[in-house]
Image (cartoon, rainbow, N blue to C red):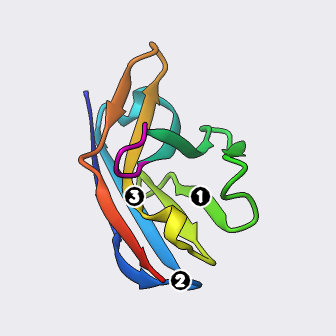
Amino acid sequence: QVQLVESGGGLVQAGGSLRLSCAASGSIFSINAMGWYRQAPGKQRELVATITSGGSTNYADSVKGRFTISRDNAKNTVYLQMNSLNSEDTAVYYCNAEGLSGSSFWGQGTLVTVSS
């Protein structure tokens, strides 16, 4: 099992920045890729960004050039730096870890609200 705890969400004005953190614990040796997803009110959960154990990254088109995902393996933590935020970025952001066996783990989510 892997436990994920997100932090860093909050209220920010449009054009501002936030950094989300996701700390992993438990069977972290079994983690392959980690990522961030988000779910806005009335919408389905969608991919924001992922990063593999080797450091390869992938981003949704809507956040490319604005968001940066990174990981600190020594701290078992993944970060999401979010710049130039706009109202469409308002959502609950979830951290995800994909295990080598194909299992998937989720954090409890952290709310990001962008005011215009």
- Looking at the image, is 42 positioned above or below residue 80? above
Q: Amino acid at mark 3?
A: Ala
**In front here: 113 or 4?**
113
Q: Amino acid at mark 1?
A: Ser
Residue on which disc 1 sits: 70
Q: Are marks 2 and 1 in contact (CB under 8 Å)?
A: no
- Say which quarter of the image contains residue 71: bottom right
- Looking at the image, is 78 positioned above or below residue 52? below
User: Which residue does the image show at 49% across and 19% down from the upper left?
Assistant: 100
x and y percent of residue 44 in the render? 43, 37
Q: Nearer the viewer, mark 3 or mark 1?
A: 3
Residue on which disc 2 sits: 14
From which residue to which does the magenta span run? Answer: 39-44
Residue on which disc 3 sits: 91
Characterize the local packing of mark 2: few (<14), some (14-19) or many (20 or more) Cα atoms within 10 angstroms: some
The earlier-in-sequence mark between 2 and 3 is: 2
